[in-house]
Image (cartoon, rainbow, N blue to C red):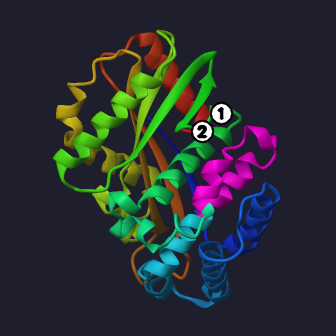
Amino acid sequence: MGAFYQHTYEGIAEEFERTTAWLEGLGVEVRGGRMDEIALRVGEICAAAPGLAVDEFTRRFIDDDKFWFASVEALGLNRFFRAFAGRPRRSLPLESLRRASSTAAVAAPSAERRTAPATSDARNILFELELATDFGRDNLEVTHFDDFGFRFEDVAFDVQCKRLLSPNQMTSNDRVRDAYRQLVDRFSGQDSRGLVALRLDRVIETDSRVCYLPKGRTPQDEAFDLARAFDPFLRDIRAEIDDPRVLGFLYYITFPCISGSAGATRALPTYAHNTVVRAFETIPSIDWDRLKRLVLCLGG
C-alpha cells in the first residue's frame, strides 16, 4: 500500500520567497545564513533550468551537493507551507520550524549524502515536517508534531520517525528498535495505534542519482520495487515488535526522476515523494482494513 506525490523544480524560488515570508510572520528567523543560501541556490536553478537538457541539469544541480541540498530543503519547507499556512499559529510546530530554519541546523553536514548522526538534526526535523505534510495536505487532522500524530476514523495514531543513516543492518536495526520503544512509550492507552516511519534515501542510495523511468513505468512502480528489495533488511527486527498497537512500517522514499533514458529528453526531472505502508501480518483485520482506507485517503 502506498501514496505518491510528484513536485516540479519549476517555480520553487518564488514559492520559497512566500514560505520565508510566512515563517518570518510567525516569528521564525529567516534572514541571513542558510535560508539566504537556499534562496540564492534555488534562484539559480530556476533561472538556468529552462534552457538546459536533462543531463546538463543533472550535472549542475543534482550532482552538485550545494544545489541538491538547497533544492531538497526548499521543496520540503514549501510543501509544509502549502499544507499548513492556513492553520492558527498556536497549532504550528514553531520550535521545529526555528530549528529547521536556523543557520546551525541546516548547515551542509545536515545533507543526506554525508550525514553523521551528530549533525543530522535539521534533516530529522524536515523528515518529520514533510511526512506530516503528506497527511495534513489531505485534510486529515494532524494533532501534534512530536514526532507527529493524526486522527483517522476517530482513532488516534502516533508516528515515530527515523532516518536510517547507514547501510549497516545492525546500525539500522538499532535505530528501528529505538523508534519502536519511543512509539510504545508515547501511546496514551490500549486504543492508540501507531506506525514506525523510516526514511530510506541514505541506505538505498536514491539520494545520489536520477531515476530514469522507461515508458510505462511510474515513480510508484520504482518505489514499490525499492520497498520490496528493502523488506528483507528488516526481517529480523520485525520479529521483535510484539505490541499489537504498532501496525507496521511506513517507508518514505524520495528521488529525482524523469521519464525516458539519459540524454533522450529535454524535460526536467520531478521530485517524487513515495509513502509505502508495510502492515504487519499479525495485526487484526479491522486495523488492516483501516490502514487500506487511510492509504486511499492519502491518495494511494
Quick check: is 90 in the magenta stretch? yes
Location of residue 213 (image quadrant)? bottom left
Would residue 235 appear left or right of 82 to someone viewing this image? left
- SS of the residue at dot 2? loop
Q: Residue tagged by mark 1?
A: 142
Provide the residue designation for mark 2: 145
Percent x, y of residue 220: 45, 50
Residue at the spot 56% in from the left edge and 71% down from the top edge: 71
In the image, what residue occupies the spot 47% across and 88% down?
56
User: Foreground residue, 28 or 231?
Assistant: 28
Q: Answer with the quarter of the image where residue 65 lies.
A: bottom left
Q: Do we see residue 188 in this rendering?
A: yes
**Dot 2, crowdedness within 10 Å: few (<14), some or many (≥20)?**
some
Instruction: Provide the secondary structure element on which disc 1 rests.
Output: strand
Per the image, is 108 magenta?
no
Main secondary-structure element of the magenta-colored stretch: helix
Which residues are the magenta region?
75-100
Q: Amino acid at mark 2?
A: Phe
Which quadrant of the figure contains the C terminus?
top right
Which quadrant, please, contains the N terminus? Answer: top left
Question: In the rendering, at what x and y percent does residue 190 appear?
Answer: 46, 9
Report the front residue among 197 and 119: 119
- The count of marks equals 2
User: Residue flagged by tag 1: what amino acid is it?
Assistant: Val
Circles 2 and 1: CB atoms closer than 8 Å: yes
Separation (CA) of disc 2 from disc 1: 8 Å
